[in-house]
Amino acid sequence: MFDGNDSRNITPPLLKCTDVPQFTALQFAASTFRNDPKLHLRHLLSDSNRCLSLMAVHVTTQEFEQGQNTTVDTTTPVLLPGPLRTKSSGAQRRIILDFSRQHVTGETMELLFDLADRMGLTERMNEMRSGYNINFTERT
């Protein structure tokens, strides 16, 4: 467990997210949504394959629920068959991520993931979970 003594030299990010090409690609995708009537949310919601592809269910482990393992595997979503509103088995819990009601497509989500990868979001999240001070503006 983290003891509060952070000897690492946390530096501010070298780039703003608006300075990378992945952000420009997202801006272009957003303009496409605004200008194409076929990408209206009403039409997107009528596509059941799209809706299913934008849903993921993460299941916690028993070790996590008992506090023995505090890391959650966020890289492997589990698509479970059957209704999503049934109770979880045992002490496990389901975390349902449903982006189907958002104005996105699978390609848009890939662009968001690319931006997150480029900006080191996973590394920053892991540092935060480990107790490191990731907010460089609040260093003493």
Image (cartoon, rainbow, N blue to C red):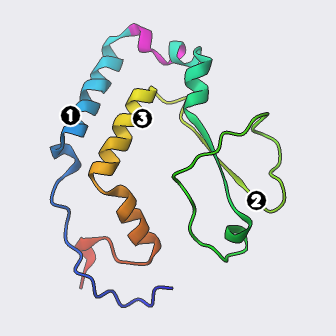
- Where is residue 118? Give x, y as percent: 27, 49
Question: Looking at the picture, which amino acid does disc 3 mark?
Answer: Met
Residue 92's tag is: 2
The residue tagged with tag 2: helix, strand or loop? loop
As measured in the structure, the alpha-carbon distance from the residue carrying label 2 to the one carrying label 3 is 27 Å
Magenta-highlighted residues: 37-42
- Where is residue 32? Give x, y as percent: 30, 18
Question: Looking at the picture, which amino acid does disc 1 mark?
Answer: Thr
The residue tagged with tag 3: helix, strand or loop? helix
Dot 1 alpha-carbon crowd within 10 angstroms: few under 14, some 14 to 19, many 20 or more? some
- Type of secondary structure dominating the magenta stretch: helix
Q: Residue 6 appears in which quarter of the rendering? A: bottom left
The answer to whether the residue labelled 1 contacts the one labelled 3, judged by CB atoms less than 8 Å apart, is: no
Q: Residue 39 appears in which quarter of the rendering? A: top left
39 magenta-colored: yes
Give the quarter of the figure containing the C terminus: bottom left
Q: Mark 3 points at which residue?
A: 109
Tell me: 24 left or right of 2: left
**At 79% from the left edge and 34% from the top edge, which residue is drawn?**
83
Q: Nearer the viewer, mark 1 or mark 2?
A: 2
Dot 3 alpha-carbon crowd within 10 angstroms: few under 14, some 14 to 19, many 20 or more? some
